[in-house]
């Protein structure tokens, strides 16, 4: 379980930033709003990242993130997010995290807030571990403001984008058809 937890923590951070408004280098706030508007209420963004293993206690896996926009008012978006982890060479999801997220466009970046009470972990191979894992993830969520700079995201073919944080695998995102 330790290896699963370690391999997932960094991509959980990516997932938290999943639907923060996106940029392409030095975009303006208005360009960020245009991208956010491309994902209206009811739309779904799907993101994938490949997590490399370390050859020891962490296996390589695919991370699939799905976020559905459930509400929007001005610069504030609400989403239901699920994050699935699938070991390379398998089609079975080993762990799923789900939560409600609010993202607010600010001048300095995106303010991302996860509803701690909505955070849940599902782990079919070890259901008894789910409460402990849920608590572990919730305890690692940022306290206070979590501003995500626009500079970590690059628009590819609008409205698709890539999130690239230093030292992490790129997260490729697009609109679900």
Image (tube, rainbow, N blue to C red):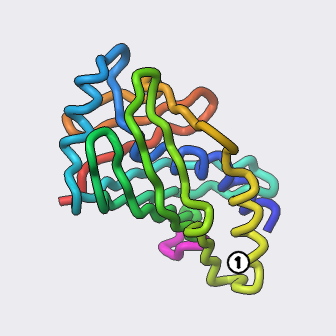
Image quarter of residue 2: bottom right
Q: List the residue tagged with mark 1.
A: 130
Instruction: Provide the residue span drawn in magenta.
Output: 90-95
Q: For the point 64% across and 78% down, which residue is it?
A: 123
How many numbered marks does the figure carry?
1
Q: For the point 66% across and 55% down, which residue is it?
A: 8
- Whether 92 is among the magenta residues is yes
Image quarter of residue 59: bottom right
- Whether 69 is among the magenta residues is no
Q: Is residue 144 above or below residue 80?
A: above
- Element class at badge 1: helix
- Main SS, magenta region, reads loop
Q: Nearer the viewer, residue 174 or 44?
A: 44
Q: Nearer the viewer, residue 30 or 98?
A: 30
Q: For the point 36% across and 14% down, which residue is it?
A: 26
Asked if residue 3 lies left or right of residue 113, the reply is right
Q: Is residue 155 above or below residue 79?
A: above
Asked if residue 73 lies left or right of residue 141, the reply is left
Q: Nearer the viewer, residue 54 or 98?
A: 98
For the C terminus, the quadrant is bottom left
Q: Is residue 144 above or below residue 131?
A: above
Q: Is residue 106 above or below residue 132?
A: above
Can you give x and y, in whole percent of width and height, for residue 18 in the image?
Answer: 44, 46
For the N terminus, the quadrant is bottom right
Q: Nearer the viewer, residue 121 or 107?
A: 107
Can you give x and y, in whole percent of width and height, for residue 164 in the image?
Answer: 49, 31
């Amino acid at each position: 379980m330790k290896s699963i937890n370690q391999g997932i923590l960094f991509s959980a951070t990516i997932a938290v930033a999943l639907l923060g408004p996106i940029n392409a280098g030095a975009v303006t706030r208005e360009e960020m709003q245009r991208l956010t508007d491309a994902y209206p209420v009811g739309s779904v963004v799907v993101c994938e990242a490949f997590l490399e293993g370390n050859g020891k206690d962490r296996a390589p896996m695919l991370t699939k993130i799905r976020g559905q926009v459930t509400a929007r008012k001005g610069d504030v978006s609400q989403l239901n997010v699920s994050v699935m982890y699938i070991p390379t060479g398998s089609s079975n999801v080993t762990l799923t995290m789900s939560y409600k997220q609010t993202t607010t466009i600010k001048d300095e970046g995106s303010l991302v807030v996860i509803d701690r009470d909505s955070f849940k972990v599902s782990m079919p191979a070890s259901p008894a571990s789910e409460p402990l894992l849920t608590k572990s993830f919730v305890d690692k969520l940022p306290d206070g403001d979590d501003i995500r700079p626009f500079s970590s995201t690059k628009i590819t073919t609008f409205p698709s984008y890539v999130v690239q944080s230093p030292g992490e695998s790129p997260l490729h995102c697009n609109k679900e058809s």
